[in-house]
Image (cartoon, grey):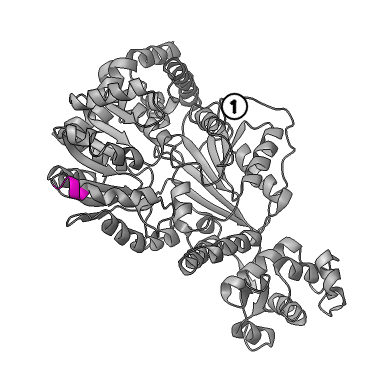
């Protein structure tokens, strides 16, 4: 029975919504497209049928690091899985091929390039039970991570007409979904769309911060997550390297990761993060697809992402174990200008500008952020989530007509020839180089808003932009233009409500001591996590130390030995027999035999 397989190998007592239906669909020999959020259980949809069906399931994956991670996790559960790629020595490749031909492998992981090269040989010499195309959005030119080599995978449907093909992705809008089905030539496919809701993720946004303000906000955030693994995403390589250095200067174990580093440097950063040797990875979007780490407790975007698809996939790397996790988006107007420049220069200008607009709407929203995300992916929510900053602290509104009129007047008096920052400089009376060069200090509105902090003016201008009072002329050096609606407000024919700008607390004093390893113990409970006793927390740390020792001995990431969620359950339940430990969700038979006695001894020792 499927539930027996699920329990025996993965330690779970029941399937998540739609998983069993998808598994049975594939086992009946039919094609399908599966959309599930990151951490939603996509892998089980092809791993369980691979174990149940005769032959070998072939899994197509875009990154060697991702394949390695998933193969290690499967082997840790006692499942015969291998990854065949060009980085392996020739002798090891021959051995793996031989194992596949002899029917000793249940799951074979290949990159698209390796699959195509092996198509005339190995794949026709083995009994293929199922093809699983992971990260299937890479197939589509409309997807956020298009990979040209993926477009050739449609050949599988022609070469293996009797083998079911399952395409899986965490993020794809309607256009991308249609393109995936077309590119892969799926035969009468069923489309399974799970809920995109990840209620364990807390959503938070802070806008208008610049320079040291932004760094201070990040330092406060990390201080509240001491010892908890996290990822910080940046737009550029330069920002990535500088921010990682800044964090290290404040005593935080941080590594940088981007495409400009050597392969060895990227591999070291990723391995150190996966194995909990560093707390934070500061990265461009080049990092993450290959990360299956279940105990990432937070994700920060230091800049505005280019689309909601990218944003949602990246925040989905937090809280994969189902425990509460925090996300934070820090951005300012400069991000919008930079991303708009990229979008206009791309080959898909209109759709990329539209996606950027939707991302900006999310960032500047004054309604439940989770509802915006779910709506984007076609899922309606009738209730506010209560787990985002807007729900927790609804905006306080005031009659902002006078503020808007001051800003609009300043823009009008420049001849609508000033950018965002220059307008702020005019309002607060700052003699910046741009103001002096244009002679804007002579305007009647110069200093008209000096009673309002510059950062608040940033927030109010963003609201005016979002409300339709302003447009940005991206082809005119990003100058602000007044819309018809804006002119009605300027001349007093209409009024407008603005939300009070939110203020940041002072930054904590920076710790100048450097550390080489991640702090061992979280100092604060996870946001929204169930209350635990001091004894439970102490036992959790004892079990976490044991897990780290076992993982180091086997050169495995700690979370593959046991997840944080399992350790929390063990600390709360405190089983003292293998039978009782086997009842804990997430511990399969293989891990129970391999590690059970060691964890039980640690629990008994703690109790004495």
Occupied quadrant, residue 49:
top left
| Residue 195: image location, x then y, percent | 32, 53
Residue 15, visible in the rendered structure:
no
Residue 145, visible in the rendered structure:
yes
Can you identify the residue that label 1 sits on?
Answer: 519
| Residue 380: image location, x then y, percent | 35, 63
- Identified at 61% across, 33% down, the residue is 254
- Identified at 35% across, 63% down, the residue is 175
Instruction: Please indicate whether residue 184 sits to the left or right of residue 149 in the image.
Output: left
| Element assignment for label 1 | loop
- Which of 255/44 is in front? 255
Please give the count of numbered marks on the rendered protein: 1
| Image quadrant containing the C terminus | top left
Q: Which residues are magenta?
A: 157-161
- Identified at 50% across, 29% down, the residue is 271
| Residue 121: image location, x then y, percent | 23, 34
| Residue 434: image location, x then y, percent | 81, 67
Instruction: Please indicate whether residue 84 sits to the left or right of residue 508 in the image.
Output: left
Q: Is residue 441 shown in magenta? A: no
Helix, strand or loop: magenta stretch: helix
């Amino acid at each position: 029975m499927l539930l027996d397989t699920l329990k025996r190998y993965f330690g779970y007592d029941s399937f998540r919504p739609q998983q069993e239906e998808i598994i049975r669909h594939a086992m009946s020999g039919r094609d399908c497209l599966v959309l599930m959020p990151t951490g939603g259980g996509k892998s089980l949809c092809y791993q369980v049928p691979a174990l149940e069906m005769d032959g070998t399931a072939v899994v197509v994956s875009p990154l060697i690091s991702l394949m390695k991670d998933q193969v290690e996790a499967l082997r840790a559960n006692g499942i015969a899985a291998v990854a065949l790629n060009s980085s392996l020595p020739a002798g090891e490749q021959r051995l793996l091929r031989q194992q596949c031909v002899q029917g000793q492998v249940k799951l074979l992981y290949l990159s698209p390039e390796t699959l195509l090269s092996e198509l005339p040989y190995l794949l026709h010499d083995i009994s293929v039970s199922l093809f699983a195309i992971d990260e299937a959005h890479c197939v589509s030119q409309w997807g956020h991570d298009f990979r040209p080599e993926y477009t050739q995978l449609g050949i599988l449907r022609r070469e293996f007409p009797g083998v079911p093909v399952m395409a899986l992705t965490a993020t794809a809008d309607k256009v991308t979904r249609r393109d995936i089905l077309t590119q892969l030539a799926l035969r009468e496919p069923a489309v399974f769309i799970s809920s995109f809701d990840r209620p364990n993720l807390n959503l938070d946004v802070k806008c208008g911060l610049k320079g040291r303000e932004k760094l201070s906000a990040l330092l406060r955030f990390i201080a509240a997550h001491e010892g908890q693994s996290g990822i910080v995403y940046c737009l550029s390589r330069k920002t990535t390297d500088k921010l990682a250095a800044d964090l290290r200067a404040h005593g935080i174990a941080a590594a940088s990761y981007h495409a400009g580093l050597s392969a060895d440097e990227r591999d070291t950063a990723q391995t150190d993060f996966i194995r909990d040797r560093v707390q934070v990875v500061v990265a461009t979007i080049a990092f993450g697809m290959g990360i299956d780490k279940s105990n990432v407790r937070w994700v920060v975007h230091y800049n505005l992402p280019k689309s909601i698809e990218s944003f949602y996939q990246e925040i989905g790397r937090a809280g994969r174990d189902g425990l509460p996790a925090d996300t934070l988006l820090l951005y300012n107007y400069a991000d919008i200008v930079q991303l708009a420049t990229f979008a206009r220069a791309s080959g898909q200008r209109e759709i990329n500008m539209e996606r950027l607009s939707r991302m900006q709407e999310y960032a500047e929203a004054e309604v439940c952020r989770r509802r915006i995300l779910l709506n984007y992916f076609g899922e309606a929510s009738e209730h506010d989530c209560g787990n985002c900053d807007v729900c927790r602290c609804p905006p306080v509104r005031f009659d902002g007509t006078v503020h808007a009129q001051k800003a609009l007047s300043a823009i009008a008096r420049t001849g609508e020839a000033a950018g965002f920052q220059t307008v702020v400089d005019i309002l607060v009376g700052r003699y910046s180089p741009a103001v002096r060069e244009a002679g804007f200090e002579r305007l009647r509105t110069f200093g008209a808003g000096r009673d309002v902090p510059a950062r608040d003016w940033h927030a109010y201008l963003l609201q005016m932009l979002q409300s339709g009072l302003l447009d940005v002329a991206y082809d005119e050096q990003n100058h602000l233009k007044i819309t018809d609606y804006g002119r009605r407000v300027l001349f007093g024919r209409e009024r407008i409500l603005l939300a009070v700008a939110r203020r940041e607390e002072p930054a904590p004093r920076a710790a100048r001591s450097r550390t080489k390893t991640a702090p061992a113990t979280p100092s604060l409970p996870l946001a929204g996590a169930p209350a635990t006793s001091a004894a439970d927390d102490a036992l959790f740390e004892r079990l976490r130390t044991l897990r780290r020792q076992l993982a180091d001995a086997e050169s495995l990431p700690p979370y593959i030995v046991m997840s944080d969620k399992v350790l929390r359950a063990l600390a709360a339940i405190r089983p003292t027999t293998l039978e009782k430990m086997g009842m804990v969700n997430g511990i399969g038979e293989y891990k129970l035999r391999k590690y059970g006695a060691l964890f039980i001894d640690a629990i008994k020792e703690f109790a004495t």
